[in-house]
Amino acid sequence: MKLKSATFLSIRGLPDIQCPFGDPMGPPADVMAITGAPASGKTRIIEAILAAKEVLAPYGPMVTGEPWLRAGESSAKIELTFVLDEEEQRMTGVKDRTVRAEALFGPRACRHEADEGFLSLLERYEHGPRYGKFEYFPDNRSLPPPGPPHGLQAVEQRMWRIGRDVRKYGFVPRLLNDLGQDAARAERFTNALHMLSPTVQYVGPTGGDPLRCFSSRGGGPSTCHELSSSEAHAVLIASTAALLHLERSIVFLDKPEISVDERNIVSFVSGVRNLAKDLQVIVATTSPTLVASLGPRAVVDLGGY
């Protein structure tokens, strides 16, 4: 599935706005940039889309509507339009591959209007390539400090995927520890890391320490906490891709420029896009290089400069 457009009405922090994610007469863009001045609403659009998704088909706790209502309003709406592939259309039983769904926010409760077959697909969460997922890399993304690791099962990961809590990456140490026993996952992780960073490599456990498994710029074995911030970001994104399988998914990436510099930002975002087949990436960015690399139909410019 891919997101074709999003319309926001009476949402706090945003004007009433319709955002096409690609050519309105064509398919959704594989990579979309939301840009604009500071405080123009770039991150707000991403997090409002994620809130709407949770109203429609939640991964986690119930959404509270009041924080999303513009001051003085008693209701608000976000309409999302998706395009499904042929297999997803068959699984859901919808008549058209283009599907619209409305998330309705109220001061006490939220509700939705959408095809129930489609919602069953949107709510499905499994670690495998068959079902698409929503994944969010917020601007506070970072590797977890040493501590008890999270489990790797879908039931343990589901609630963390679209929030901002940095504990969502608590699974990374466990995943790295277990790569030696899962050749397929280790291959996915190695390939993903190669696409995201030219300087860090996964070299496998060394010296009996399964977490001392990286080499930066050809140097000696390192743990993930000894890597640069750019390399550490690549590790957490590669870990997520290796665990979840991001085929048919929609990935939201806030401020890719905190992970890489202007010289490398286009290749970095391209690497994120190439993590899986039929993956859509929506970024919030002020990078002029990244915006210029995309066609005008692949940019939502909120202005404000």
Image (cartoon, rainbow, N blue to C red):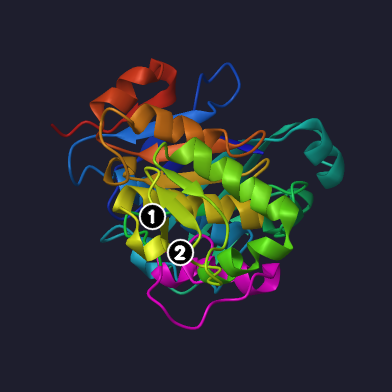
Magenta includes 17? no
Distance of mark 2 from mark 1, alpha carbons? 19 Å
Q: Nearer the viewer, residue 61 or 137?
A: 137
According to the picture, the residue beneath numbered tag 1 turns out to be 232
Tag in front: 2 or 1: 1
The x and y percentages for residue 13 are 27, 52
Give the residue at x 79% y 51%.
117
According to the picture, the residue beneath numbered tag 2 turns out to be 163
Residue that extends furthest to the left in the rendered view of this protein: 305
The x and y percentages for residue 302 are 27, 33
Q: Which structural element holds mark 2?
A: loop
**Could you tell whether 39 is left or right of 91 in the image?**
left
Q: Which residues are magenta?
A: 144-172
Marks 1 and 2: in contact by CB < 8 Å? no
Determine if residue 14 is in view: yes
Q: Nearer the viewer, residue 87 or 243?
A: 243
Q: Nearer the viewer, residue 262 or 83?
A: 262
Vertical relation: 269 (above or below) 124: above
The x and y percentages for residue 88 are 79, 40
**Could you tell whether 155 is left or right of 275 in the image?**
right
The x and y percentages for residue 251 are 52, 45
Q: Which structural element holds mark 1?
A: helix
